[in-house]
Image: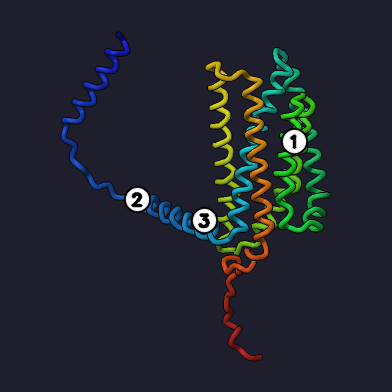
Amino acid sequence: MTALLYGLSLLLIRLTLARIPVRARNVAKSPTDSKFLLKLKEDLHVWSDFFKNVPLFSNLAITIFLAGLGFTILEFYFLRAVDARFTGQPSDFQTFYSFYKILLYSLLWLVQGVLSGILVKHTELKRSFTALPLTLGLSLLVMVAFPAFVVVVAGQFIARVVQWGWDHPSRSVVLGLVPDERRGRISSFINSFVYAASTLVGSLVILVFLGLEQTGILNQEIGSRLYLILALLTALGAVWFSLRLRDSYEKSLLNWRLTRSKRKSVLDGLKF
């Protein structure tokens, strides 16, 4: 009864407000808003033109998105496994997670300082982007088959090391192919927008599975297995697009959008 009265009250208020005449006013846009909209329009034009016509970067963006989606699901599964392992022992959870982060960042510091340059130098750039989705896919496959705590921790750890120690340096190198006048926009799209979009979609997927678990449609074990399989499929999709990236690498390098503009100097016409 209370809900019915509440709904009728809202309907009455809405009908009353609809009868009140409102004088339209022209609100002038501030210069800041105009500049922001103009810049956003230019960014969207550069993004759409670049990723539509340069297959190297369109395949790279899709590879990063799918790998990021799989990583989001893997990260949640990892944290859930750690939380279940140390249920009722918050101090042990904090101790384990602290040691995990210390070990991860220490190894990353060593890899980035010593191995990353060697890997980038001695590996063809077009083949470098298969390493992360392949490692992620293998880690998820082992987790689906053997969902033990040690397997989950090791899989998450190895995938993160490959991501930050190999994939990110390779990404920085390939972004260096973009001319200076476009590099900022393309870098922000790949490193910020694509990553944020994959995290958002991955979080929504997790929310759907949690909702199914809360309503009793799925139990936690089946739900966890299903979203791990989904993450595995996204990793396999990332592998496929990374192979497409490899095949389109040479062709993309010939695209005029990767050609640096030649600025004429005032000394060019002088003879010495």
Residue at the spot of label 3: 47
Answer few, some or many: residues within 10 Å of disc 2's Cα (few below 14, many 20 plus, some between 14 and 19): few
Q: Is residue 197 above or below residue 28?
A: above
Is residue 146 depicted above or below 186 in this figure? above
Q: Looking at the rendering, which quadrant does residue 16 occupy? A: top left
Q: Quadrant of residue 108?
A: top right
* Label 3 Cα neighbours within 10 Å, binned few <14 / some 14-19 / many ≥20: some
- Residue located at (63% from left, 28% from top): 226
Q: Secondary structure at mark 1?
A: helix
Of the two numbered discs 3 and 1 in the rendering, the one whose residue sits closer to the viewer: 1
Query: Which residue is tagged 1?
Result: 139
Q: Say which label, 2 or 3, has the lower sequence index.
A: 2
Q: CA distance from mark 2 to mark 3?
A: 26 Å
The answer to which quarter of the image holds residue 151 is: top right
**251 to the left or right of 151:** left
Task: Give the image location of residue 272, x and y in percent.
Answer: 66, 91
Secondary structure under badge 3? helix
| Residue type of the residue flagged with mark 1 | Ser
Q: Give the residue at x 73% y 17%.
A: 86
Q: Nearer the viewer, mark 2 or mark 1?
A: 1
**In the image shown, does 179 or 5 lie closer to the viewer?**
5
At x 71% / y 57%, what residue is drawn?
Answer: 126
Q: Which residue is mark 2?
A: 30
The location of residue 191, given as percent across then percent down, is 61, 48
Label 3 close to label 1 by CB (< 8 Å)? no
Task: Identify the disc placed on residue 192.
Answer: none
